[in-house]
Image: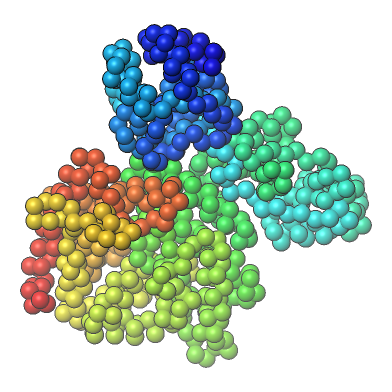
Amino acid sequence: MLDAERFLSEIEPFNYLDKKEIQSIAHNLLVEYYKKGEIIFKEGASPLDFLYILRSGSLVLEREGEVIEYIHEGECFGYISLMTSSPPSSTAKAIEDSVVFLLNKKIFNKLISTNESFREYFARKLAKRMQNVASKGLSSVERHMEVSLEDINLRPLLVMEGSSTVEEAIKEMVSKDSTYVLIKLPEGMGIITERDVLRKVLAKGLRPEEVKLKDVASFPVVWIESKSTLYDAMVLMARHGIRKLLVKKNGDPVGVLEDRDLIAYESKNAVLLIKEIDKAKTVEDLKYLYGLVKEQTLDLVFQGTDPERLGEYISEINDRFMKRTVYVAMNRLGEEPLVPFSIMVLGSEGRREQSLRTDQDNALIYQDYPLLDFDPKKYFERFSKVYIDTLLEIGFPPCPGNVMISNPFWRRSAKEWQSAVKDWIEKPKEENILNVAIFFDFRNVFGDQSLTEDLWSFILQTLKENPGFLPFLAVDAVRFKPPIGFFGDFVVEKTGEHKGEIEIKKGGIFPITQGIRALALEMGIGKRNTFERIEELKRLGVFSEEHAKDLKEAYRFLLSLRFKFQAQKIKEGKEPDNYINPNRLSRAEKNTLKDVFKIIKEFQEFLYEMYNLRFFE
């Protein structure tokens, strides 16, 4: 370890130590080799047991997907976790092949306690890091260019034999909405693109049904290993002047990267994504775009995007998927309806307040023409099954409560819907109250909007005729109390997988949405969004300026916490839910959450008095 001794004697803070100490350290060092793209340790993992010293190569530290620092030869890292016995606050990743020395915690702590210069060096580093780390980072373009190809939704492989004809390839490309076909050749993999068909076949007057793919394929196909980055792919494409790149993993093809994929990642432009969704023709396209959207949405959460705007954005994107899926489903079904219909989204999607847990909540209404030689009930039964199956293929999870148009309960004619909601309002039993809470935020996402508008008008009129219904809706808003104890402590789960966590939907988000919904329905407000409903209620004098502001800020804070914890759970490979861990909140966040729960309690008291809910006890 003579090289280690010499190396340590030339870098801070080891140059503060005497020769014997350096010799002892060098003798106890571990040496690790990391390939480009390999992870040294991950953010949020167990507290580190080593100080890491970069001997050669280059590393990067990332926090929540953001690059916060580059590590160069001779620099130490991992010391924050080592000194505080806390999980690493960042992920360390090699951005080129690197050699790292590891010094165990016992020796490190001994040096800290016995050598003042060594101790002061890391104390200064720790203080500086805590102050500056949040402000460091690369631009979004640079950050996305460091994304590994293994983390990208590659376009699926479309492979044909060299003996197939160009005509067969054209049909395959059209059916799969692909711009290329990979060709199996004796010497390896070739490729033919739309441009090749035009230039090599049609422009020369050749007949596609007579030309074999092996005779016009480009060979060899330029390829790249999946461990490479987007930046590597961009350089390779530019070097060869190509628009498509085959991606291999351990020598086997796994997908294709196109130049438009680079554009999508580089720009992360919502307008471009929406345009791509709107013109998608196949399930494969929509599935690919859905993967892109999920990645982009996580980026927006980690960037601290306002939760109101973020919820609207997610809902708008989901709307586009829902609309485009109608066309895909009808193509699959091979028939179109002969009557007007509307697909509605419900719940948080209807309110444009989507979270990262985007399961399906939808319903369908259609106009029933009895004299028409067409059975809409049977048609929409077939259509709904294909539609929901297609959404599942794209990546939209099913609704756990089966609130989907494949369930006949949520698929009715206009007259049947009127009959159903009238029954719910006139008979406010528990099941009907639940149906109202689910359905009465409905919003047209595809089809004849007049159907949903007429239904909404019918609901408001029925509510006027049944004023005794709304207290039953309001009582649900006061049923669940905010999870905070008498002495101001958070009431957390005592057992199970969520031990130590708070469920913020039941005792936080739901009381606001349900209470505001009841008030909005009473005042005949057509808005579905909770923030917009609060504004309207303020305008109508139901809330004071201060009360409305408090409710909006409380709701906004709860949504931001839910986004934050859902994004972190997705990043950790877990399912997003409505639980948060108060121990992972800053002191300021804890205090704000306590204030929010106080506002919710006051709002519940307001509802209690307004609707005389003492009679429901």
Rendered location of residue 440, percent (x, y):
31, 71
Foreground pick, 210 / 431: 431
Q: Nearer the viewer, residue 453 or 214?
A: 214
Q: How many marks?
A: 0
For the residue pair 43 and 563, the one nearer the viewer reads as 43
Relative image position of residue 201 (x, y in whole percent): 87, 49
Q: Nearer the viewer, residue 83 or 166?
A: 83
Relative horizontal placement of residue 604, taking residue 431 as reference (left or right): left
Percent coordinates x, y for residue 547 in the rendering: 13, 53
- Answer with the quarter of the image where residue 134 lies: top left
Q: Is residue 464 above or below residue 511?
A: below
Q: Residue at left 18%, top 76%?
A: 472
Q: Residue furthest bottom?
A: 371
Q: Report whether residue 35 is seen.
A: yes
Q: Please tell me which residue is depicted at 24% across the width and 48% down the height of the picture.
A: 582
Q: Quadrant of residue 354?
A: bottom left
Residue appearing at x 71%, y 47% in the figure: 253
Residue 249 position within the rendered picture, expressed as x and y whole percent measured from the top left: 67, 44
Report the residue at 10% width, 76% height from top: 617
Please determine whether, in this image, residue 340 is positioned above or below residue 56. Answer: below
Report the coloring of the rendering. Answer: rainbow
Q: Quadrant of residue 306?
A: top left
Say whether residue 516 is visible: no
Q: Which quarter of the rendering shows the N terminus? A: top right
Is residue 261 positioned above or below 126 on the image? Answer: below
